[in-house]
Amino acid sequence: MKKRILVLILVAMGLFSCKQDKKSTQVTVDIKTLDSVKNTENKKQLAASKFIYTKYEYKDSKGTSLIIENSLPKGGKRYTDPNGHEYVYAVFWTRITNETTNPLELKIDFPPDSYEIPSLPGKYYKTLIPSDTMTTEKISLFNYGLTNLDPFFDKNIGKPSSLKRTINPKESSAFYIVALRLIGGDQYDVLRTELSLKGQNLFYKVRDKEIQCGSINLKNLTLQK
């Protein structure tokens, strides 16, 4: 009888030990998975940082931030519109990270008209916003992964271009902006663009030409220097 009791106790202890080992292994696997995800995300962020031209951080009264990152250009291909006008274009992206506690309501509107760059007299630009969402996986691709642009240009070259997007707290969202320039005269110029915030108004700068282009709903944000 005593031997049977002893055997049952040993079996029970063995089963308990197996369960503990299984649980411990599961915890270890979960931790490794989380570390792998973090490392992958860090690598993506590092890859993206190589293509960032400017980064602006704005803080509210609570000390939480809204961050705007603007990319360097990619592209340089040509496009001919239905009326025979020739353009050269470059693709940019902007990423907005909302670290505040409130949803961000983003509205951007670009006019249909071309505009002249003061430092590049005689050169006229248009800005268009494709509906595609930019992701870090597309960083290394040509045109940052933006494709089928000619049909998009055909439909939108003479129209206003707009974007409306909600960015929830602790989330980020990136979008494309394409700058097109009418071909004529000296074709070489180095183009840089950026989106920035003044109060609740958004401004887009192409070289030294600044355009008021939209707004956000968040108030009392201060640029950090």
Image: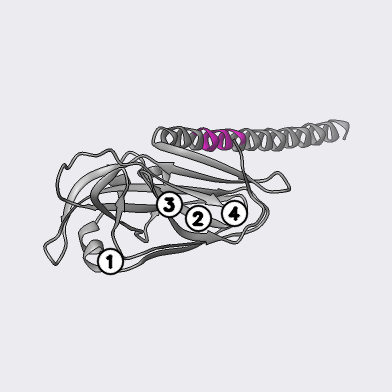
In this rendering, is residue 52 above or below 116?
A: above
In magenta, the rendered stretch is: 31-39
- Residue 105 x, y percent position in the rendering: 56, 62
Instruction: Single out the mark in the foreground, 3 or 1.
Output: 3
Residue 33 covered by magenta stretch = yes
The amino acid on which the numbered mark 2 sits, given as a three-letter code, is Leu
Residue that mark 4 sits on: 199
Residue that mark 3 sits on: 204
Judging from the image, what secondary structure is the residue with disc 3 in? strand
Total label count?
4
Residue that mark 1 sits on: 156
CB atoms of marks 3 and 1 within 8 Å: no
Q: Residues within 10 Å of mark 1 (few under 14, many from 20)?
A: some
CB atoms of marks 2 and 3 within 8 Å: yes
The amino acid on which the numbered mark 4 sits, given as a three-letter code, is Gly
Judging from the image, what secondary structure is the residue with disc 1 in? helix
The amino acid on which the numbered mark 3 sits, given as a three-letter code, is Tyr
Q: Residues within 10 Å of mark 3 (few under 14, many from 20)?
A: some
Q: Residues within 10 Å of mark 4 (few under 14, many from 20)?
A: some
